[in-house]
Amino acid sequence: MSEGYTPPLEMTDELTTLVIEIGELAGIISAGGDSAASPMLRRENRIRSIHSSLAIEQNTLSLEQVSDVINGKRVSGPPQDILDEFIHPFADGNGRTGRLWHSLLLRKWRPFFAWLPVETLIRDRQEGYYAAINQSNTEGTSTAFTVFMLKIIRDAMLECSRQDDVGINVGINGARVLDFIREAPNSSARKAADALGLTPRQVERILAKLKKEGKIARRGARKNGYWEVL
């Protein structure tokens, strides 16, 4: 790439607004503790991102199979789908390579992007993803695709930074509570609060919300039971 290269991008009011929103959200998330996720949670989210990136390309492996391939285990599945863990630019794998680069650039800008579900949102909006690529190809400019990706990034950040009616950051702290009860399922709300720097009431509200969303379940008696992450 020459020093005088100018990308085929037209700055529009919509692009400018999205960039401003993302910058503001980055400040909110960073202030809430963007390094809160443990290595275990970060690894799980990276595996989910890899699975989503593969699924965008019609790969049929399940999340568990992708995890097994990464861990060096034998996997029963279509040989080509298994070989797709391995990026081999540029005759094939351009989409995955591009998404990898954009993830690395975002993580370099703000560490919390290491565990935001950007790839998962792309997979959920796969039709729009390809429509934006086709529109950019037709118009000869990357503006439409850039707008689409900025909206994905913004929405992932909104999910992370969302607060409940009493101001609890359930995006970040919800992930922290989930990570804590994975490692210590028998812990009480008070123990979780002490470990995470929250109040017991905050933890109880987060647990109730996670339970309502079907992300966790309480097993056994109230005193001697445990939390299960679903």
Image (spheres, rainbow, N blue to C red):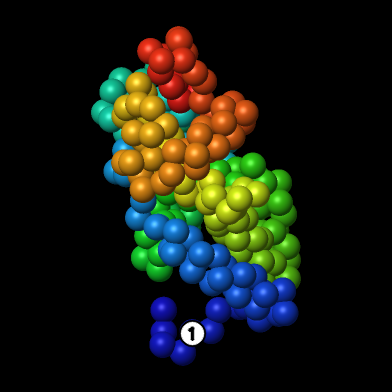
**Residue 218 coordinates in the image, percent (x, y):** 49, 18
**Residue 42 coordinates in the image, percent (x, y):** 36, 44
Q: Residue at x 42, y 32 (%)?
A: 189
Which of the pair 79/20 is nearer the observer? 20
Examine the image and state in which quarter residue 43 appears.
top left
State how many labels appear. 1
Furthest residue toward top: 220
**Residue 117 coordinates in the image, percent (x, y):** 51, 47
Other residues around mark 1 within 10 Å, as few (<14) / some (14–19) / many (≥20) = few
Q: Is residue 230 left or right of residue 3?
A: right
Q: Residue at x 38, y 13 (%)?
A: 224
Q: Residue at x 35, y 44 (%)?
A: 196
Q: Is residue 216 above or below residue 153?
A: above
Q: Which residue is mark 1?
A: 5
Q: Is residue 46 above or below residue 133?
A: above
Image quarter in which the N terminus is found: bottom left
Which of the pair 119/227 is nearer the observer? 227
